[in-house]
């Protein structure tokens, strides 16, 4: 026989269980319609992952030639190309690619209307200033139109200043190389006096074998 006290405790336990079930059911009930709402824009700036770059810089934007070594056959003016630096900051370089720097000059124009001196009268002697194990090489000497053959074409076309034989090897070896060149202008002895200016354009290219 169950006593009245035990029955009361069982009833309370059952009622408590029902109450707990009731609370659990209320957690899944639908939310009522909101009285109001407002949105918040969530923004984030995600920077791109840079692989570095291949770039060219020139130490100065002008240089001056001065007369030295003239002869009875020609007048000669010499100077130096400002240092030209190629920098490769890329983490990965595609296999089989190489870079090179070229130079091409325009005619020397006189500021007082003198006849132009064509670019084939300007030559250069490239030199690599950065020590390396052969990853980068200097270009060949280019003579002027008043010099003996071969390669006495002057800087009328894109002549090689420096060449990376393999961009991947060059980048792994150093990442930065500097070259310059001795410049020489040879003119006929009867060249018109006065100031002249030519634009020497330096260009960096990358190609693939």
Image (cartoon, rainbow, N blue to C red):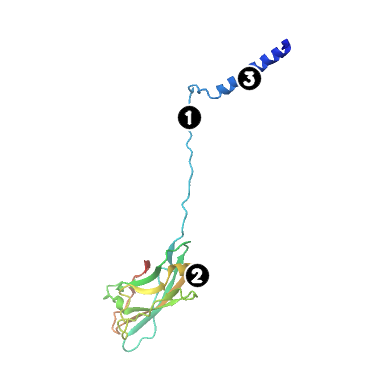
Q: Residue furthest front?
A: 1
Q: Nearer the viewer, mark 2 or mark 3?
A: 3
Q: Which residue in the structure is indicated by mark 1?
A: 38
Q: Which residue in the structure is indicated by mark 3?
A: 17
Who comes first in sequence, dot 1 or dot 2?
1
Q: Is residue 206 above or below residue 22?
A: below
Q: Residue 20: x, y in percent? A: 62, 21
Who comes first in sequence, dot 2 or dot 3?
3
Spatial distance from mark 2 to mark 3, Cα to Cα? Answer: 77 Å
Residue displayed at 34% across by 88% down: 71
Badge count: 3
Q: Residue 57: x, y in percent? A: 43, 66
Who comes first in sequence, dot 3 or dot 1?
3
Q: Residue 7: x, y in percent? A: 69, 12
Q: Which SS class for mark 3?
A: helix
Q: Which residue in the structure is indicated by mark 2?
A: 173
Label 3 crowd (10 A; few <14 / some 14-19 / many >=20): few
- Residue 166 position by quadrant: bottom left
Q: Residue 73: x, y in percent? A: 31, 88
């Amino acid at each position: 026989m169950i006593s009245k006290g035990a029955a009361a405790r069982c009833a309370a336990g059952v009622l408590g269980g029902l109450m707990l079930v009731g609370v659990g059911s209320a957690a899944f009930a639908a939310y009522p319609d909101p009285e109001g709402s407002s949105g918040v824009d969530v923004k984030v700036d995600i920077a791109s992952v840079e692989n570095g770059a291949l770039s060219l810089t020139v130490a100065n934007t002008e240089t001056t030639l001065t007369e030295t070594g003239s002869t009875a056959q020609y007048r000669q003016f010499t100077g130096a190309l400002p240092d030209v630096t190629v920098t490769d900051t890329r983490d990965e370089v595609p296999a089989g690619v190489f870079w090179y720097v070229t130079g091409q000059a325009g005619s020397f124009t006189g500021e007082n209307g003198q006849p132009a001196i064509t670019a084939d009268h300007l030559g250069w002697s490239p030199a690599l200033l950065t020590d390396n194990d052969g990853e980068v090489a200097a270009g060949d000497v280019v003579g002027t139109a008043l010099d003996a053959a071969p390669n006495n074409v002057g800087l009328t076309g894109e002549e090689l200043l420096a060449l990376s034989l393999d961009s991947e090897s060059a980048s792994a070896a150093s990442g930065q190389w500097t070259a310059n060149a001795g410049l020489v202008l040879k003119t006929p002895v009867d060249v018109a006096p006065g100031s002249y200016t030519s634009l020497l354009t330096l260009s960096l290219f990358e190609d693939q074998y």
